Amino acid sequence: MENRAHALAAGLFTLLLGIGVLLAAQWFSRDNYEKVQYTLVSNHSVSGLNVQAAVRLRGVEVGKVESIDFDNDDPRNILIKINVKGGTRITKGTTAQLGTQGITGLAYIVLDDDGKNQTFLPPSDDKDKRIVVQKSFFDELTGSGKDLITQFGEVAQRVNKLLEDKNQVQLIKTIAELEGASKRIGSLAQTLEPGMKNVPALTADTRKMIANADVAIRDLAPALKEAKTTLASIDKLAREYAQRADALDRAAKGVEQVGAASQGAASSLSGDIAPRVNTLLEELARNSRNLDRLLSELNEQPAGLVFGRPSGRPGPGESGSVEPQKR
C-alpha cells in the first residue's frame, strides 16, 4: 500500500513539474512588446517558410510569422500574416522577399525599403495595403535553370539533327577537304620559306630607301619654299596685270566714247559747213577764170591798162569799116 502511495506521489510530482516547465517556457518565450499585424501576398511558392519564422527589416529582426494560408478570393495568392513590433517603420515603399538560413533550407521574411516612397503604411487587412512578396534569388535561379534546360534541350535537338547520317557523310567529306587544304597550305609555306628569308634584307633596303627619300624631301624643302615665293610673286604680278588690264579697258571705253563724240561732231560739221565750202569754191573758180581773162587781155594789149580797153573793129557796113583787098 505504501508503494502505491509513493508511486502516485512521484507521478503527480512529475506531472506538476512538466506543467511548470511548460508554463515557464511559455512565459520566457512570449514577446514582451506591442504587436501590429501586416498582411503579405505572394503569387509564387513559399517553400521553407513556417509559422513563427523570423521577420527581418534590413537584417534586423522586428517580428514573426503569424499564419500562412491561401486567399479565399484568389487561390493563386498566398496570404502571410506577420506580427511586427509597434513603431516599426513600414512604408508604402516596403517590399518583402523570402530568405533562407544557411543549409537548413528554412526560410524567413526579409523586408526592405528603397526609400522612394516614405509614406507610412498603417496596419490593415485591406487588399490595397498588402505588401507584395517578390521572387527570391533562389526562385529566379530556378526559373533561369528551367530556361537553361529548355535551351539545352533545343541545342541537343539541333545537334542530333546535325549529326544525322546524311549530314555525317557531308561532315566527313568537309573534314577531308579541310585536311587536304591544310596539307596544301603546308606545302605553300615550305615554298615561301626561302623567300621569307630574304624579307629581313628587303626590309632593310626598304628602310634605306625611306631614309633616302626623307633626305631628298629635306633637300627639296628649300626649293619648294623658293617655288612658293615665286608663285606668290607670280600671283602678285597677275593681280597687277589684272589691275592694269582693267585700267586699259576703262581707257579703251573712254576712247570709244571720244571717237563716238568726234564722229558725231564730224557728222554735224559735214552737214553744216560742206555746202558753204562748195559755194566758196565755186566763187573762187569763177573769180580765177575772170582773173585769167584779164591777165590775157593785159598781156595782149598792155596799153589798155592806161587808155582803157580799145573798141572793137567796125563790122561790115559800119563807118570806118575797111574792106579786105582782093587779090
Image (cartoon, grey):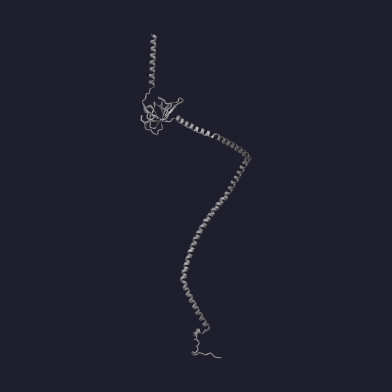
Extreme residue toward the right, this view: 194
Q: In which quarter of the image is the N terminus?
A: top left
Question: Where's residue 264, x and y in %?
Answer: 47, 67
Question: Where's residue 75, x and y in %?
Answer: 39, 29
Q: Which of 138 and 95 is in front in this view?
A: 138
Q: Say left or right for 321 vs 5.
A: right
Extreme residue toward the top, this view: 1
Which image quadrant is residue 41 in? top left
Residue 21 versus residue 161 in the image, above or below: above
Q: Nearer the viewer, residue 118 or 44?
A: 44
Question: Where's residue 167, x and y in %?
Answer: 55, 35
Q: How many marks?
A: 0
Q: Quadrant of the C terminus?
A: bottom right
Extreme residue toward the bottom, this view: 326
Q: Say left or right for 19 vs 204.
A: left
Residue 303 versus residue 168 in the image, above or below: below
Question: Where's residue 70, x and y in %?
Answer: 39, 28
Residue 273 versus residue 12 in the image, above or below: below
Q: Which of 308 and 206 is in front in this view?
A: 206
